[in-house]
DNA sequence: AACTTAATGTTATCACCGTTAACATGTGTC
DNA sequence: GACACATGTTAACGGTGATAACATTAAGTT
């Protein structure tokens, strides 16, 4: 009696490790975590994780997938309350992006972190592209409705708007926005940019 | 005779270490370097560097200062061939920023990297702000000449343009621009954005 | 039910990292 | 020349990602 309560085999170490890593990252507000920390949190020895992940970055890559799901959740939810193809729709998308960047600071940083694993880059690129396509379709719809003569530029317009949103988000993430203009507000900036980009070439 | 060619005291280890670190970063194309690597390159033991830098991040911060000088050099040089306060001036500034991001990939990454040293953040913020002010003045001049009614918005306009340039630069840095639009060209995108932002509210 | 095999844990260990301590060697000053 | 101080050295520590060798459990075959 009084034997080990937890069995030798964990059961679902793979997924639990990913979740534990994500929780850890969120709780300390930084993606600078340790294999040992994750292992301890799951209640397992550190090398055990190497049965499920080739190296630390593979684990972080798995967490990155979660972050993509997370931001897609933000985006999807933002679309729910809004009529498709309207300016409000575009504002909602941008606002969701900015909100994710501030709400989930560590995750946002992790998403765009440089890492070497070339194999996982493709999967990530695909995930980011699907997020991008939501924006692209919204812009395409908007242009066809309100500026049919510019509808052919929807891809370039979407790329530009994503770039702008990303720039504002990362500058805010690095606490640089208010260094430049202490009254700067990310949402207002993005709304201004959105209108400028859409109005261009009139 | 045949004594040690290098004296016991290095003479200017502080600056040499910074330069060595910078060279190392540039040569391997990543700011993920090691104190030992830097020490070896200077021909000194690793702990010797701790006489000149409190911790590794202090050394990296010193390199960051160099990167700020470097990008200011790009910007200053870009201004030389161009008439102040023109659209060409603004294009040149943006182009210089993008060029630095691609030419000095590792340095650009280092510049905006998250790091904990709160003390050095202020100095960096100041350096970034002076870079920003060049853009701000150029935009202010442009607006006063070509759109005097919007001259009051020059700060917000500059913040927006920097954000856009930064977004394009970082997306390109993460090889994401052509993931979205394989024909995307950073310079063209930024020029489009510049014109859109300046034309707005007409 | 027993044996085999593969999956998945364990502990021991490695090389390397940032960093500190204790000691050595120069340099400048009176 | 003696002393203080700056600046270098080697030795060592705790922590990191990762591997090796071994232990345990689960699953499949007969």
Image (cartoon, coloured by chain):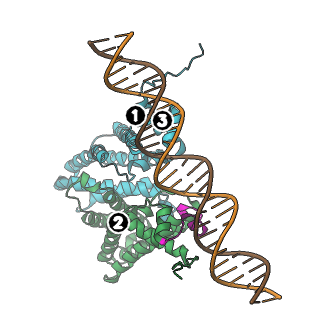
Chain colours: A green, B cyan, C brown, D orange
Chain letter, disc 1 residue: B
Q: Nearer the viewer, mark 1 or mark 2?
A: 1
Q: CA distance from mark 1 to mark 2?
A: 39 Å
Q: Quadrant of the C terminus of chain A?
A: bottom left
Residue B133: image location, x then y, percent = 26, 45
| Residue at the disc numbered 2 | A101
| Residue at the disc numbered 3 | B20
- For the residues bearing labels 1 and 2, Cβ distance under 8 angstroms: no
Chain letter, disc 3 residue: B
Q: Which residues are magenta?
A: A42-57
Q: Residues within 10 Å of mark 2 (few under 14, many from 20)?
A: many
Q: Nearer the viewer, mark 2 or mark 3?
A: 3
Q: Secondary structure at mark 3?
A: helix
**Apparent side of residue B87 relative to residue C24 in the rendered image (left or right):** left
* Quarter of the figure with residue B197: bottom left
Q: CA distance from mark 2 to mark 3?
A: 35 Å
- For the residues bearing labels 2 and 3, Cβ distance under 8 angstroms: no
Q: Is residue B44 magenta?
A: no
Chain letter, disc 2 residue: A
Residue under the point 50% across and 61% down? B178
Q: Which residue is more in the foreground, B77 or A49?
A: A49
What is the number of the mark on residue B109?
A: none
**Apparent side of residue C30 relative to residue D16 in the rendered image (left or right):** left
């Amino acid at each position: 009696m009084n034997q080990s309560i937890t069995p030798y085999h964990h059961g679902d170490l793979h997924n639990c490790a990913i979740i534990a890593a994500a929780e850890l990252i969120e709780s300390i507000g930084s993606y600078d975590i340790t294999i040992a920390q994750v292992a301890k949190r799951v209640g397992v020895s550190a090398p055990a994780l190497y049965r499920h992940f080739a190296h630390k970055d593979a684990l972080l890559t798995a967490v990155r997938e979660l972050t993509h799901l997370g931001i897609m959740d933000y985006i999807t939810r933002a679309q729910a309350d809004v009529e498709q193809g309207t300016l409000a729709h575009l504002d909602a998308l941008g606002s969701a992006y900015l909100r994710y960047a501030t709400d989930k600071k560590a995750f946002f940083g992790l998403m765009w972190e440089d890492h070497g694993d070339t194999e996982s880059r493709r999967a990530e690129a695909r995930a980011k592209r699907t997020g991008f396509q939501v924006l692209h379709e919204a812009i395409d719809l908007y242009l066809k409705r309100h500026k049919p003569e510019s509808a052919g530029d929807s891809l370039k317009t979407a790329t530009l708007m994503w770039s702008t949103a990303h720039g504002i988000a990362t500058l805010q993430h690095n606490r640089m926005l208010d260094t430049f203009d202490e009254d700067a507000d990310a949402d207002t900036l993005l709304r201004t940019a959105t209108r400028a980009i859409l109005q261009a070439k009139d």
